[in-house]
């Protein structure tokens, strides 16, 4: 009982801090809303026929410390470990040394390898799975497996010097999404939602979508989890069925008025319960009910592609006709970003190329190349890339050496944390720029290393947030997305 | 040697013991004697012994610490001598009190007074070493400052033109952030910032200021390095110069590092003027930036400062914002405690007749305005034109034509405008390019393919973006459909 009370008190402290911080601009409407979030005046909100703008939650900060360059984030995560050697980090040495042993000094400098290849007696280099060409004014090298991205590479900053400490998918992916290798911390999208709220009260401000699949490593929910933040900051997962948001449509026999009446009664009950316990999770739950109610209209509008001209949709590639594919998710992502959804996260699995490297990576690249290029182009054409930050990430890279039997052609590449590649584009990021260098084997970083926490700090910075100041008090201490590290990578800022 | 330096630094910790204990001993001693009580005698014995022991410890650590600072520096020598004397007198006092009570009875006032005096002198000399000679009286009244040999503090100027670049801007920053180590007694790196002459003289590696060339000037270089660079100054985690201060120093060197430099004559250019103003404490004059102290706290500040629109506007009344939100506009400040606003219409929300009139009451504050799909017609653009401070404007997905664009000619601050999915034509947007700050115009539309263009207006180039520019690569081999089909077949059975 004591524990429960202390936890409750902590939440109340958080709640009151939130309403204090919300002061300043938008005082009236905002304060009312914040109060309702703190669970003190829930009943007032739904009864008023307020405009959706007045219902918009501006987040705990309301605005960044710095003027934001990015108003929206598109995070595309290549789940499984996208090989840098076969995509963006071109190393002629690997072609020359194909089949020859990777120098042990290079391998030792990279630290531990996974237990899957650790026992190998030989570590032969392998050439990239395709040839490379230089593109655009930046002259960045891009694999022939990604020709469409190559054509627009001048929009990107290619960060070739990413690194992580982790060697396995689960901790590495959690680290990427939440800044920590164990479950329980909020994901970046949830942090952003907590900090800045929403610009469109009719849609969730954080939407996640998954594609890919077919074996390999599965996506896990920590990537859009709200961790210890109030649960309404969690990302809403759009599925691939006819109903992208499950159970959001009303069952037969229930009309809109009936739903409204039902919610109004629920509010009264919730209010009574709140007066007893003051648990902000009740408010969270009601917020979500209300959101679901508004989504009954807004979601069909997002997923209905009837208004899209065929040539616009066609640019995303043939897969776009199939719901649940990466291409289809890219179209939805654009439509969500157009509607001011703040954080859209696409996760595409199938990059874990331990074996049959050529086939596996060609297949994955083919699935994402055209859709990514079409999505970024679409944002650019519509003038949205100016204030949308695009981040293409992966939890780690892959080894320059072969995993498995070199002569059998079934070899692949193992996990590799010491260097891998991110792509960034859009708001506040240099266009047509390559940042960081790896050694001639693409095995260790030669200059400008960028840690996962640094990238998180940079992303928050571009949203106007000081990553050291965005904290949440939980279980006796303040937590942040970047844990106790992270430096803004100034070299990639425009 | 490192071990000695390491242990030596504990001097700074240990020294508080003798100060505290001996002060206590003296206090109890005096109190006991004035009240003529022997209640404290035993305790006083203990205090004197403990004081003497802690003084011994401190002196030993101090001698080690002196090895690091340079035992031959005048300031260090004086502090050491005073410290050793204090040790001796406190040992003698303690010994006499314990063993030669009778002699002590007669001599105690002398012992106590000497100990107290030496305690103050030693402490002060040590403080000078750590904090700099001017630390104590820096904010003292003028007569005290003069007594300590300090010049009068620079008179606070009320406007920029009254100020002097060195005396009012550069020198105060150097005194504030550098003089702790670079003073006449400590002279780290043989360099002192105590006067203009000593600054120009430089340190052990020669001059630190190359007149006119900040990049070649060691002083500027070292304060402007990355904060974790080994050569960065100030080191050891001491508070760095603020970005404004660094900027001012750079400009001062560029201007030839003059000793007397009236700001009225120098006329700071627009890019350093806000920094100078803030350094003079005149931030409100024309640059309404967030408070310098607050912004200087964390990294990223430099960019943030520069990207802030230099606009002097009042904060909008909260009720105006509430009104606008009731009409479907999402209103946010562009940054915390910043009066400038970012306004966007709720997606898929169409405005009614007087909605823009309600929003117009915020027209001076709005710098970003997004009215995508708000159902605007050409006639509404007259109302949009009243947002004269707007820098980024989105009018996409509205039924507007070239005719309406003519009304926007007053938007002198406009940098980027989005007219995608409207009925405007490449001909119509040419006059937008004449607006003095426009850089990007978006005119993509799904039904008509239009080429990108680039319009030259003097040194300014306006990009008209109608589609994504694509870079043709060298020869590339695309995967053919047959290959993909084959791949699919292969992969349908086996992956991992």
Image (cartoon, coloured by chain):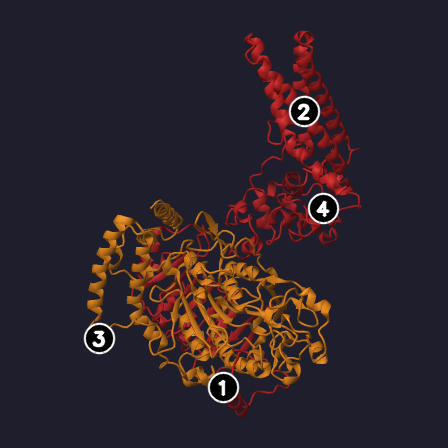
Chain colours: A orange, B red
Chain letter of the residue beneath label 2 in the structure image: B
To which residue does mark 2 refer? B53
Which disc number belongs to residue A252?
Answer: 3
Q: Quadrant of the C terminus of chain A?
A: bottom right
Tell me the mark number nearer the camera, choosing from 2 and 4: 2
Q: Are marks 1 and 2 on the same chain?
A: yes
Q: Quadrant of residue B200?
A: top right
Instruction: Give percent across and percent down for residue B418.
Output: 45, 71
Element type at mark 3? loop
Q: A180 or A323: which is nearer to us?
A: A180
Q: Are marks 4 and 3 on the same chain?
A: no
Q: Residues within 10 Å of mark 4 (few under 14, many from 20)?
A: many
Element type at mark 4? loop
To which residue does mark 1 refer? B493
Q: Residues within 10 Å of mark 3 (few under 14, many from 20)?
A: few
Which disc number belongs to residue B257?
Answer: 4
């Amino acid at each position: 009982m004591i524990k429960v009370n202390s936890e409750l008190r902590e939440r109340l402290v958080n709640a009151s801090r939130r309403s204090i911080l919300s002061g300043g601009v938008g005082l009236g409407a905002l304060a009312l809303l914040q109060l309702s979030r703190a669970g003190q005046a829930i009943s007032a909100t739904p009864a008023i026929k307020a405009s959706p703008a007045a219902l918009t939650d501006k987040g705990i900060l309301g605005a960044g410390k710095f003027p934001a360059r990015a108003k929206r984030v598109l995070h595309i995560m290549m789940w499984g470990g996208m090989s840098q050697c076969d995509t963006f980090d071109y190393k002629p040495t690997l072609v020359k040394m194909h089949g020859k042993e990777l120098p042990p000094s290079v391998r030792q400098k990279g630290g531990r390898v996974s237990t899957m290849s650790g026992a190998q007696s030989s570590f032969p280099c392998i050439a990239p799975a395709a040839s490379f060409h230089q593109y655009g004014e930046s002259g960045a090298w891009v694999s022939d497996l990604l020709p469409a991205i190559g054509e627009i590479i001048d929009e990107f900053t290619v960060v070739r010097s990413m690194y992580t400490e982790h060697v396995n998918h689960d901790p590495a992916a959690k680290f990427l999404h939440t800044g920590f290798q164990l479950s329980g911390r909020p994901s970046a999208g949830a942090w952003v939602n907590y900090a800045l709220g929403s610009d469109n009260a009719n849609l969730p401000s954080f939407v996640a979508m998954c594609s890919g699949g077919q074996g390999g490593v599965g996506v896990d929910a920590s990537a859009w989890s709200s961790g210890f933040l109030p649960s309404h900051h969690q990302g809403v997962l759009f599925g691939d069925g006819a109903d992208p948001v499950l159970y959001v449509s009303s069952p037969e026999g229930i009309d809109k008025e009936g739903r409204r009446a039902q919610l109004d009664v629920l509010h009264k009950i919730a209010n009574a319960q709140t007066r007893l316990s003051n648990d902000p999770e009740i408010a969270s739950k009601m917020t979500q009910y209300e959101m679901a109610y508004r989504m009954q209209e807004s979601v069909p509008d997002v997923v209905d592609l009837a208004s899209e001209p065929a040539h616009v949709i066609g640019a995303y590639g043939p897969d776009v006709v199939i719901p649940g594919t990466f291409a289809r998710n890219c179209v939805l992502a654009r439509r969500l970003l157009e509607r001011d959804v703040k954080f859209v996260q696409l996760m595409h699995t199938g990059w874990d190329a331990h074996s049959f490297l050529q086939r596996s990576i060609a297949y994955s690249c083919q699935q994402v190349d055209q859709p990514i290029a079409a999505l970024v182009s679409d944002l650019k054409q519509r003038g949205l890339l100016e204030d949308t930050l695009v981040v293409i990430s992966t939890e780690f890279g892959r080894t320059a050496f072969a995993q498995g039997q070199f002569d059998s052609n079934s070899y692949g590449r193992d996990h590799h944390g010491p260097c891998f590649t991110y792509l960034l584009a859009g708001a506040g990021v240099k266009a047509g720029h390559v940042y960081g260098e790896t050694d001639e084997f693409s095995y260790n970083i030669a200059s400008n290393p960028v840690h996962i926490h640094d990238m998180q700090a940079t992303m928050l910075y571009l949203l106007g947030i000081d990553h050291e100041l965005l904290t949440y008090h939980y279980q006796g201490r303040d937590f942040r997305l970047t844990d106790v590290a992270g430096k803004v990578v100034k070299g990639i800022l425009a | 040697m490192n071990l000695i330096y390491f242990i030596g630094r504990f001097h700074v910790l240990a020294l508080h013991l003798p100060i505290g204990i001996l002060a206590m001993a003296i206090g109890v001693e005096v109190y006991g004697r004035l009240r003529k009580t022997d209640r404290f005698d035993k305790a006083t014995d203990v205090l004197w012994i403990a004081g003497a022991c802690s003084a011994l410890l401190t002196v030993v650590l101090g001698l080690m610490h002196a090895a690091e600072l340079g035992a031959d520096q005048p300031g260090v020598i004086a502090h050491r001598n005073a410290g050793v004397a204090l040790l001796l007198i406190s040992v003698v006092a303690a010994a006499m009190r314990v063993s030669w009570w009778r002699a002590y009875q007669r001599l105690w006032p002398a012992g106590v007074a000497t100990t107290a005096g030496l305690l103050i002198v030693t402490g002060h000399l040590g403080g000078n070493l750590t904090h700099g000679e001017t630390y104590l009286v820096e904010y003292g009244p003028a007569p005290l400052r003069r007594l300590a040999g300090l010049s009068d503090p620079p008179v606070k100027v009320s406007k920029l033109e009254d100020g002097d670049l060195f005396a009012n801007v550069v020198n105060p920053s150097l005194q504030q952030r550098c003089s702790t180590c670079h003073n006449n007694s400590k002279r780290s790196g043989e360099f002192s910032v105590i006067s203009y002459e000593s600054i120009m003289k430089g340190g052990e590696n020669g001059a630190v200021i190359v007149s006119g060339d900040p990049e070649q000037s060691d002083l500027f270089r070292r304060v402007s390095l990355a904060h974790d660079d080994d050569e960065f100054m100030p080191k050891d985690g001491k508070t760095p110069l603020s970005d404004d201060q660094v900027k001012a120093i750079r400009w001062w060197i560029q201007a030839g590092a003059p000793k007397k430099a009236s700001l009225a004559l120098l006329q700071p250019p627009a890019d350093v003027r806000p920094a100078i103003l803030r350094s003079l404490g005149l931030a409100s004059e024309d640059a309404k930036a967030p408070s310098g102290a607050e912004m200087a706290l964390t990294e990223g500040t430099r960019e943030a400062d520069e990207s802030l629109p230099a606009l002097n506007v009042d904060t909008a009344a909260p009720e105006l914002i509430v009104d606008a939100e009731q009409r479907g506009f999402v209103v946010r400040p562009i940054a915390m405690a910043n009066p400038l606003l970012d306004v966007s219409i709720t997606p898929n929300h169409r405005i009614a007749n007087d909605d823009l009139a309600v929003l117009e009451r915020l027209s001076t504050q709005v710098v970003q305005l997004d009215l995508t799909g708000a159902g605007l017609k050409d006639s509404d653009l007259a109302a949009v034109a009243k947002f004269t401070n707007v820098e980024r404007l989105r009018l996409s997905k509205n039924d507007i034509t070239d005719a309406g664009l003519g009304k926007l000619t007053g938007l002198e601050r406009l940098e980027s405008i989005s007219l995608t999915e409207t009925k405007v034509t490449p001909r119509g947007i040419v006059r937008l390019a004449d607006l003095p700050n426009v850089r990007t115009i978006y005119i993509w539309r799904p039904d008509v393919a239009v080429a990108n263009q680039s319009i030259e207006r003097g040194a300014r180039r306006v990009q008209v973006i109608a589609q994504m520019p694509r870079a043709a690569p060298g020869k590339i081999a695309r995967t053919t459909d047959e290959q993909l089909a084959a791949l699919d077949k292969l992969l349908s059975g086996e992956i991992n």
